Structure formats: structure tokens, C-alpha cells
Amino acid sequence: MALIVQKYGGTSVGSIERIKAIAERIKFAKDQGHDVVVSVSAMGDSTNKLIALSRQVFSDKNMTQDCSREMDVLLSSGEQVSASLLAMSLQEIGIAACSLLGHQVSIQTDAKHRRARIDSIGTERLVETIKLGQVPIVAGFQGVTSKGDVTTLGRGGSDTTAVALAAALNADECQIYTDVDGIYTTDPRIEPGARKLDQITYEEMLELSSLGSQIMQTRAMEFANKCHIPIRVLSSFNSDFTTQGNGTLITNKYNDAEAPLVAGITFTRDESEINIRNLPDMPGMAYKILKPISEQDIEVDMIVQSATRDGHIDFSFTVHRENFAKALLSVEKTSLNFENTLINSNAHVVKLSVVGVGMRSHAGVATTIFEALANEGINIRMISTSEIKVSVLIDENLLDKGVRCLHKAFALNQKKET
Amino acid sequence: MALIVQKYGGTSVGSIERIKAIAERIKFAKDQGHDVVVSVSAMGDSTNKLIALSRQVFSDKNMTQDCSREMDVLLSSGEQVSASLLAMSLQEIGIAACSLLGHQVSIQTDAKHRRARIDSIGTERLVETIKLGQVPIVAGFQGVTSKGDVTTLGRGGSDTTAVALAAALNADECQIYTDVDGIYTTDPRIEPGARKLDQITYEEMLELSSLGSQIMQTRAMEFANKCHIPIRVLSSFNSDFTTQGNGTLITNKYNDAEAPLVAGITFTRDESEINIRNLPDMPGMAYKILKPISEQDIEVDMIVQSATRDGHIDFSFTVHRENFAKALLSVEKTSLNFENTLINSNAHVVKLSVVGVGMRSHAGVATTIFEALANEGINIRMISTSEIKVSVLIDENLLDKGVRCLHKAFALNQKKET
């Protein structure tokens, strides 16, 4: 018997049919003897509908007033609806349940509306509810300030609610139900041999951004990491409840003695690259180039600077494609201050990343990557590495080929013997 | 400068367009120098939509569980949406405003979900908000138990919220905005000469049920009567804001020295009549007839018993037409216990009522009614009287004729000289 926090996202509670299916799933866990605490998102696209309604209020598309306090009151109604409907659905099949809103739990946050952070979670009402044999259905995404005003936690805030509940209650596991049955070694739409991972670390999950961020909010991941809450990513669309122990378990280290070398291959589409050659090699050059770009709130991803050659350097970086034109203009302006510079750019590149905590202790990973790409005739435009990730920039029309050859090079379709 | 509580019903906040129109109306009152506190219903038919959603949860049409606690959580989300949207609309036109939910105000109720009664209203947050120059937009219909659970006040509960706010804040006036511009002497669809009343008493308003109940909930009226809160019924669809002092004022007595003899003519359609003749005149006869009827939860309206004649009496009563068959069957069963009884019934009758506090001190009202109806050849099937009301039962196809002749008999189309 364990204490489990289950979180159901918008698609998992998208209709009454779906809500009823979830009620059956919760019943199964209860019947297994577990104590269950549930956190829910708003039904399907109801949050977007509420946002659309609020947009009609404002004649100008840019809200002239800071309405974030009222937006929180408006948006939090969505989780209120799904929480009460789920509680009713449980009662209908004979499981005692009780919806709890942010102010009832109480989920205390700071007063930064629309992106509030949780300060504390009161466990009194939750524990009381569990002791009464009821399943607490907590409205996710919402909290309350010390003054009693409603706040919301930002996009994906229900994940944060679930992890915070698990931490406050010292739960055995926090299950994140979504529309996929776990984390894969890469996107199965590109590599049909992609394999679901049984386990992964928080670090790897954070680095596997393009695979992971759609499944779980980064902030919630960081929170879970800090509090050592085991997370399990599962599908709510799987009607075989006995698979509840499956999915992908996310923990701070592998249960097995040895971590796999590589956990997965991820990628970011829509990147763009800007390269400046023959810049004088002097202190502060990177700052001079990037300062006017960051001042426009443009996020720079990869940054590479070559070694000096004849007192000159080459400097390259990537930005999201939507900021390409602005960034290029900025670089062109800055380079007017220097003689003989040469600017190259490419708005059609993608970033491939190989992620794994195992590579910390193994040197050969980068070599394997370069060899695999070379064998396929894929040119590497830029390289950047971190402790548990190697990223390369390539032409966007080589994305699928690149993912497949790297997946094969690390034999990710085969489960490791443990 | 006055403190005014304004209540806007579902049709008044039925769309963003309507909410914006109301924001302009509130701005007008603020610009006149008044302090305004607002209570809102849910938008249009949103409450019915939420109810329909909850019905889908239950396989059986009769809910097998008592889900009233969760229904309150679900339904209260409707007023949360309209309150936040109205607050945003006010901010957009430069009026500081702040939505407040039941737990924020705080509107403390008992724990009878779906029909809770207000125990107390905290004024601290309201007064603080007003002092900050903000318009408090209170979500109507909802409250919170001492434990922090959400409750709702039953149909028309926003009226109760408004009156309770006015009482707690000792407001100068409670304005009920609706889709009609006041209380009329009778239904203008039947008598085009129907005149809007400038003033009426709580008692008269309560008796004018068919005219009044569509405009304001009975319980809210009784509350206002008890607390001496002046109520003004107004239209939110009138774009001339300078008419805010008009509508119909409802108070506990007339400002003028003398009350008008008759305030208005009201009627109830869909009545049915059952008459039993030759019942033995013995104690408990009325009880014997009506007990099995009330046991079926059928409400009996008019009850008339004739004087004894040869040791026998006639007994008549009315029920709503939908209960006619059940009530008739019950009476037929009961009458089997007595010899020679004769049952007559008519499922196509209506009740006409003449209402006015002035008739307390004037004897001639009933006479005028009977004379007017006789002149039109309208047969009276039953009569019942109270201190401020005379009701008669007539054939349903004579309804329009009856209303018009009574309206004329009391010269209600003409305003009294005062």
C-alpha cells in the first residue's frame, strides 16, 4: 500500500467519457489498497476558450491594463469544473471523493499573478480527507495568496501542483498521466524503432527537452528533482489498468548499478545560424555581438567561438528561426565597427542532441556521433557539448536521416541487459 | 453621494457585449460620485450548460449519489467567470475593479448545499476595496461554509447575495437590473394599457407572484423586507443611464401619505380545480381529503369549503395542472369512504388576483371585482381572499378578458394624483 499522487492533463479529462475512464483508473488504484490524491487540469481546450473570451473584452489586442489578477480568477474556473466533475464521476461508481480548490487545500503562493510560485501547501485538509476514506481531487494550476486572492502557476502548472502535493504529503510516487505511455528514445514518428524507456533521470529528462517538455513542465521537473519525488509518466488512454506500474519512471539516479550510456536522441526544429568571420580577437567580443541581441529579448542557444588565427576569430550562434531576421540585422550593424568581417547565415538548420548521464564516464560518445554522421554524409555545422549532452547543428532536410543513424549507432532500439 | 449595490442577472451579462454595456453603466454611477458594489449572475445559460454536463456523469437520470457538494463547486464557476470578465471590462475603461468570490468576501453560509442560507457577510474586504477606490464585483449565488467548502444559494441566489450585501454594508439602495424596466400593473402582453409602477411594497411584490417572481427571487424579497433595504428594479437594456433613478422602487411602505387601493392584477395559468359535493359535515374532513394529496408532494393552492347544508358540505381546491390527474385519483379513492358524493373537476382554469395594500382599509374592492366580471359575463368558480389580495378562479379562455376588465375597473392605466 502506497500513497500515490496522480495528475491528469487536459486531454485526459477532455470529455465526460474521458473523465469517467479516469474515475475507473482511480478506482483500480484504490482497490489495490493505495491512497490516491489527484490533481487535474482544465477540460481539453477550455482554458483557451476562456482566454479567447477575455480577449473580446479588450478593444486593443494588447491589453491596456494589467488584468492578470482577473485572468487568474477567470482561468482557475476551468480546473474547478473538471475537479468537481471527476469527484462526481467517482461517487457515481461508489468511490468517495471530494474536490478541493486552491484556497481549500490551501496552496499558498506569492502574488505574481499568472506565474505564481508555491510557497507552501497545507496538508491538514488533505490528510483529513484521506483519513475519511475520500479521494481528494485537487484543482491543479491554481493557488491563493496570503490575502486570499486566486493565483495561477503558468502553463503546465498542474504538473507543479502534482509534484508539490507529492512533496508535501511525502508520497511514494507522482504519476503524470498524459496521452503517451512514457518517454521514448526518440520521436517514433521519425524512427519507428524508438523504444519506450523504463527509467530515466531528471537531468536527462530536462535535456531531452523536445521529447520531454511536451509531457511535463520544466519547472515541475526541477521541483521533483530538488525534492526527490519519483515521477512516473503514463498514458491515461491505456485501458489495461494493470500496466500502472509501467510507463517511464523518472528519478535522480538509475536503480541499476550502471546507467545506460545514452538515454535518447532529441532535436529542435526551426533553428537558425549566424556566423561572423574575421572578428578581431579582443576581450569582450562575444559581449559586443550578443548584448544588442539579448536586449531585444532574443534567446541565443548554441554559441561557438573558434580559436585565434592571425589575431582573428570566428564567432557563431543559433537563435530560433522566428528571431532570425532581427538577430541578423543586429549582427550586421555591430560588424560595421570592424574591418573585413564576413557574415554567413542559414535559416534552415536543426539541432540534434544525444543525451545520457552515462556519457559522463565514457569518452567515446562524441566520436561515435561524428562517425555515424560522417558515414551518412551529414555535414556538422556546429557542435556544443555539456556534461550529459552532445549537440550538433545540421541542415534541416537531414533531420530524419540524422536521428535514425544516431539511434542505430547507439543501438537504442535494443533494451540493455541489466 | 450614496452607496449602491447593483445586481445584474444572467441575461444582463449574457455576452461580452452585454458585460461591456454594464461596465459603462457602472462607470456612470461612479462618475456621479456614488460608491458601487456589484453582484453578478453567471453568463446567460452557462449554469444550465454546467448542469447538462453533470447529468452526463450519471448513467441513471436520477443521481444515485448525493453530489450536491460537487454540484456547488461546479455551478459556482459560472459566476466566477462573469465576475472576472466584468472586472476586466471596467479596468479596460479606466475604472478600478476587483472580483471577489464567496470565500474572499467572505459570505458564510450553512452547509446545506444547493440551497444554503447566508449566516453572515464579512465587510472587511469589501470596505477595504471600496476605500482603495475599486468597485468590488462579487460573484453572486455562492458562499462558503465555516469549513471553507463552496455552497450555492439556490435558484435566483444572486438576488439574495445582492440584498445581503446591501444589508451588511447598510447600502442606500439595492438595484436589481433585469430585462424589464420595472413592475407593471399587469402583463403588458395582455393589457397594452399596463402601467409601470413607480413604487410598490414588499408585501404587494410578494403577492404579485406571477409578475414579480420572474424579476426577483421570493427569498431575497423577504430578506429585503426584514432588513428594510430599498430595492429598485431596473432594466440593464436601457442605454439612457440618466434613468437610473427610475424603475420601480420597492419599500416597506409608500412614501406618499396614502397607498393606492390596488397595485396590480396578476394571474396564474395552468391551474386545475377539483370539487367534491355532499361530503358529510364532520371534523377532520378537509384533512382526510388533503392528506393523501400532500403526501404525494402536491401543492394545494386555493381551498374553499361551503357552509353546511342538510349536514353536508361542498369542498373545493386547486392544484397545478401537472398534478391534476394524480390529485383527482386520490380524491376519487378517498370519496369511496362516503356515500352519495359527487366529484366535479376542471383542468382548464386560471387564477386572477387583485393585489394592493390599500384594500386593507377599503371594503369595496371585492364588490368592484365581482361587478366588473359580471358585466363581462365571466363566471367566478371559486373565490379566496387575503388581507391584501382577492383571487378568483375562472375559465382559462376568459383570462385576457378578465385581466383587461379588472385593469379598467381599477383605472390602473392612469397614474393616481398624489
Image: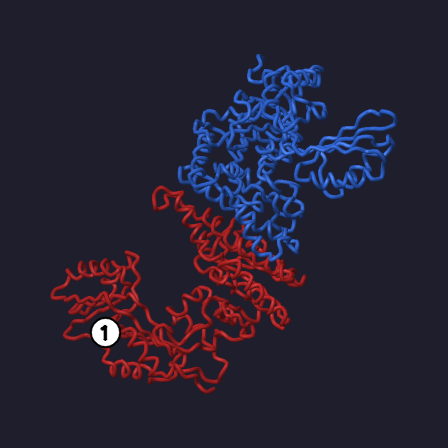
Chain colours: A red, B blue
Closest to the observer, A363 or A166: A166
In x, y percent, where is residue A270?
29, 65
Q: Is residue A109 above or below residue A237?
A: above
Q: Which residue is mark 1?
A: A381
Relative image position of residue B66 (x, y in whole percent): 66, 53
Q: Depth check: give the residue in front, A357 or A186.
A: A186
| Badge 1: chain ID | A
- Seen in the picture, residue B158 relative to B357 is either above or below; the reply is below
Residue A269 against residue A369 in the figure, above or below: above
Q: Quadrant of residue A286?
A: bottom left
Considering the image in quadrants, where does the N terminus of chain A appear? bottom right
Q: Residue at x 38, y 71 (%)?
A: A207
The answer to whether residue A302 is left or right of residue B223 is left
Give the percent coordinates (x, y) of residue B265. 61, 23
Q: Residue at x 18, y 58 (%)?
A: A333
| Image height of B210 relative to A312, above or below | above
Q: Secondary structure at mark 1?
A: loop
Q: What is the count of numbered marks? A: 1
Q: Position of residue A14 (x, y in %)?
A: 48, 59
Amino acid residing under circle 1: Arg
Quadrant housing residue A399: bottom left
Direction top: furthest residue? B417
Residue at the extreme left of the image, as rendered: A340
Q: Residues within 10 Å of mark 1 (few under 14, many from 20)?
A: some
**Left or right: B404 as drawn, with respect to B307:** left
When asked about the image quadrant of residue B415, the answer is top right
Q: Is residue B304 visible?
A: yes
The answer, for residue A176, to whether it is visible in the render is no
Q: Nearer the viewer, residue B116 or B355?
A: B355
Residue pictured at 44% horizontal, 64% vertical? A217
